[in-house]
Amino acid sequence: MNTKTIFSIMFILLCFRSIYAQHTTGNLVGRIVGGNGDPIPSVNIIASSERQQGIRGAATDESGYFRIIALEVGHYSIQINHIAYQPVQIEPVRIRLGKTTTLGEVKLSPRTLEMEEVAITANRPLIDPTTTTNGMNLDLKSIEQLPVQRDHRSLAVLSSQAKVSYLGDDMTIAGSTGLENLYFIDGMNTTDPNFGRTSSYLPYNFVKEVEIKTGGYAPEYRSALGGIINVVTSSGGNDFSGQFFGFIANDAMRGEPKLGLIEYETIQRTIWA
């Protein structure tokens, strides 16, 4: 095998690996301008969070734009500082899994007098104009308040385009079968290559955020005809912390099972010869 063939094989393997690479973080972008709308360069942007180790920062370019990439998902406090302008603090800013959050255009006032910090609170728009992907994101705080099963796969059923399959093949998404979905945990593809199901069963208590894509996603998911379930687990922070949880279940806490639409009742009979 010559050198050209070896390099060709390595290039194909690297491309195949990049196809299945999944996002485990999010990004933050925005633009800083003055009162007259002119861009302000060299503005310091600092992003801090209780779930983020240390702080992350960036500076605006000549056009006033900034970008902070690879942020852990969660809620952040954004501090904007410049020596010639009043400091601004924006919170809470939620960084979503696999998404780019934008602050839009932030205007700074000239620093003429020492004033207190300004906290701006705003709601995220209902429609994301930056992507064509259909689906939803759920964090642990939202999951804990919803009636879900202990398996992380049950979280996908919370989407309006997903439902439980009566054929025993996980859940169907956007009209596909349960064997046409892709499952990712912390960026790793956990889909069973033989049957198309997930090969890992993760309790939802370990889930930090789940991204459910039901349609309109990029063509990089070549083997997915249904949905994409992308999960990231909780990570450490600056403070030492832990959690304890438990589950109670017995026959007194459930009702009698009912037959589905395509299930048949089984009757056992003994025939004496």
Image (cartoon, rainbow, N blue to C red):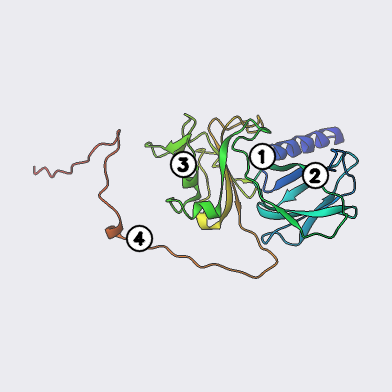
Give the class, few, some or many, for how many residues have Cα within 10 Å of label 2's Cα (few <14, many ≥20): some
| Residue drawn where x is 85% and y is 34% of the image | 2
Mark 4 — residue? 249
* Alpha carbons under labels 3 and 2: distance apart: 41 Å
To which residue does mark 1 refer?
Answer: 20
Q: Give residue 45's position: percent from left, percent from top.
A: 81, 52
Residue depicted at x 27% and y 40%: 259
Instruction: Provide the residue designation for mark 2.
Output: 107
Q: Does 37 sit left or right of 127 as displayed?
A: right
Residue 24 to residue 52: above or below: above
The image shows residue 58 at horizontal and vertical percentages of: 83, 50
The circle on residue 157 is 3
Counting residues from the N terminus, which is met first, the one under dot 3 or under dot 2?
A: 2
Q: Position of residue 177 (x, y in %)?
A: 46, 32
Mark 1–mark 4 contact, CB under 8 Å? Answer: no
Which tag, 1 or 4, sits closer to the chain's start? 1
Relative to 6, is 260 on the left or the right? left
| Mark closest to the chain's N terminus, 1 or 2 | 1
Work out which residue is located at the far left of the displayed protein and give it.
Answer: 273
Judged by depth in the image, the label closer to the viewer, 3 or 1, is 3
Name which residue type carries label 1: Tyr
Q: CA distance from mark 3 to mark 1?
A: 23 Å
**Quarter the C terminus occupies:** top left
